[in-house]
Image: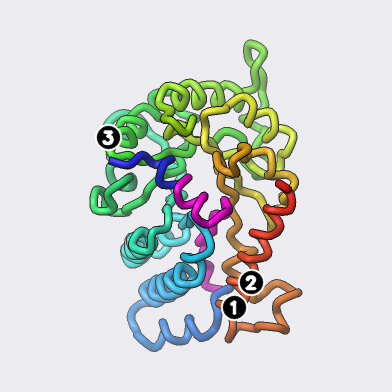
Amino acid sequence: MSRYVQRLHDRQTRFGNGICVGIDPRMEQLPPGIVAAARARGGSPLEQAAAAFEEFSLRILDVVADLVPVVKPQAAFFEELGPAGMLALARVNRAARAKGLVVICDAKRGDIGTTAEAYARGYLAGADPEAAPWAADALTVNPYLGRDTLEPFLKVAKERGAGLYVLVRTSNPQSGTFQDPVTDGRTIYERVADLVEEWSAGLAGDDGYGLVGAVVGATYPQELVALRARMPHVPILVPGYGAQGGTARDVAAAFDARGVGAVVNSSRGIIFAHSRPEFRERFGPDRWEDAVRLAVEEMRADLASARA
């Protein structure tokens, strides 16, 4: 069974970048042609929205599969649409796996005992996409119920060659409300980081990384530098680049000297690139896929320049 980090790093090395494209469909921002086609199929409004999300996401995969190593579908936008949306999410994840993309499902699950294990078994397929209904290579998890909320996820991830990304220092403006308080000389996020490092160090392979990763936002670049040093065996998922204000220089410290060890997520700035002012007149809604491809290529060049 291949390890999650092995699959991730193999693909990063192949494509020469650590870009993660976030798939966060929103009905009001979709290209009009996709919305019109979904409505023409009929069904309830939720079913039409799910069909539009699925077509949009699949076409995103077609554009980015030969450019980036990772995609990150955001489960919430699909869940909002009920059963049709969740079926669409499953199909999108499976289609991404079929194209060789690494899939991080962003569902931020967190519970204890058998409930946590049920979440893990539902989402974490790991090496074999058929091992779980939602077929993800990796899953984001919320640690704030305590150590025992993570242990069931860790158990399933080890069994299946999957990965986890634990929320450590998130990119939202008020993350410090619960992450910054200090106990025994450490902030709460540092305490979470130390547990993540302990587990990943104990599971590290020849590449030096374990399966337990950390979410560390680009919007806190100084903390990112400190946490990279604090978690040398931990793969990092970096949100907050682009639309949230994080820059290529802000995220450069997440990578090791080989250019692996981290992935940087961009969602709106890529998937809705046709709406960006600098692309709007050039591409418009009819050529939105061309805008997506150019946005990825620009991000790839931007990240590379910051690491040069």
For marks 3 and 1, give the CA distance. Answer: 40 Å
Q: Amino acid at mark 2?
A: Leu
For marks 1 and 2, give the CA distance. Answer: 6 Å
Q: Which residue occupies 33% across, 80% down?
A: 43
- Label 1 with label 2: CB-CB less than 8 Å: yes
Q: Which residue occupies 48% across, 39% down?
A: 165
Q: Above or below — where is 169 with respect to 87?
A: above
Q: Which residue occupies 32% across, 53% down?
A: 135
Residue 143 lies, in percent from the top left, at 48, 31
- Which type of secondary structure does the marked residue at label 3 adopt? helix
Circle 3 is placed at which residue position? 159
Q: How is the image coloured?
A: rainbow
Is residue 115 found inside the magenta-colored segment of the image? no
Circle 1 is placed at which residue position? 290
Residue 137 lies, in percent from the top left, at 38, 48
- Which type of secondary structure does the marked residue at label 2 adopt? helix
Residue 178 lies, in percent from the top left, at 62, 30
State the mark number for residue 69: none
Among the two numbered marks 3 and 1 on one chain, the one whose residue lies closer to the N terminus: 3
Q: Amino acid at mark 1?
A: Asp
The span shown in magenta is: 9-28
Circle 2 is placed at which residue position? 294
Extreme left residue here?
Answer: 130
